[in-house]
Image: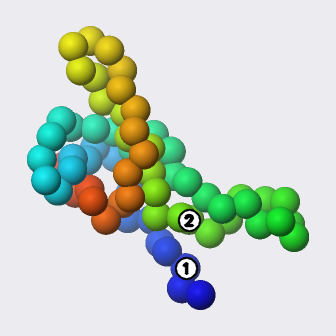
Amino acid sequence: MNEIKPKFKIGDNVELKSGGPEMTISKLHMNLNISTSKFDNFTGNVDCQWFLDGKRQEELFHQDTLDIID
């Protein structure tokens, strides 16, 4: 099984490759290892947050759908 490496870290500013608002990475999703009861093995999914009309939005995205904003 190939381990997925995170492309981003919490706090990075990103946007969808297809366009959209500037978002911030807020969480990296990890799998729970049942034998050790610890989270490991990044799933490739991240939570992103952004503001729309003054309201905080949050959604789960796969990291391959995102680009870093410099």
Instruction: Please state the horizontal and vertical placement of residue 55, each as a whole percent of the image.
Output: 32, 15
Q: Residue furthest top?
A: 54
Looking at the picture, which amino acid does disc 2 mark? Phe
User: Closest to the observer: 38 or 10?
Assistant: 38
Tag 2, which secondary structure?
strand
Please report the residue visible at 21 percent of the width from the left and 13 percent of the height from the top. 53
Instruction: Please state the horizontal and vertical placement of residue 69, each as a whole percent of the image.
Output: 19, 49
Instruction: Please state the horizontal and vertical placement of residue 68, each as a whole percent of the image.
Output: 23, 54
Q: Is residue 2 above or below residue 31?
A: below
Please report the residue visible at 36 percent of the width from the left and 60 percent of the height from the top. 63
Examine the rendering and report whether any part of residue 70 can be seen. no
* Callouts 1 and 2 close, C-beta under 8 Å: yes
Instruction: Please state the horizontal and vertical placement of residue 18, each as a whole percent of the image.
Output: 13, 53
Side (left or right) of 44 relative to 49: right
Q: Which mark is residue 14?
A: none
Please report the residue visible at 51 percent of the width from the left and 52 percent of the height from the top. 28
Label 1 neighbour load within 10 Å: few <14, some 14-19, many 20+: few
Side (left or right) of 57 relative to 38: left
Dividing the image into 4 quarters, which one contains the N terminus?
Answer: bottom right
Q: Is residue 28 above or below residue 24?
A: below
Q: Quadrant of residue 48?
A: top left
Q: Which residue is mark 1?
A: 3
Q: Which residue is mark 2?
A: 42
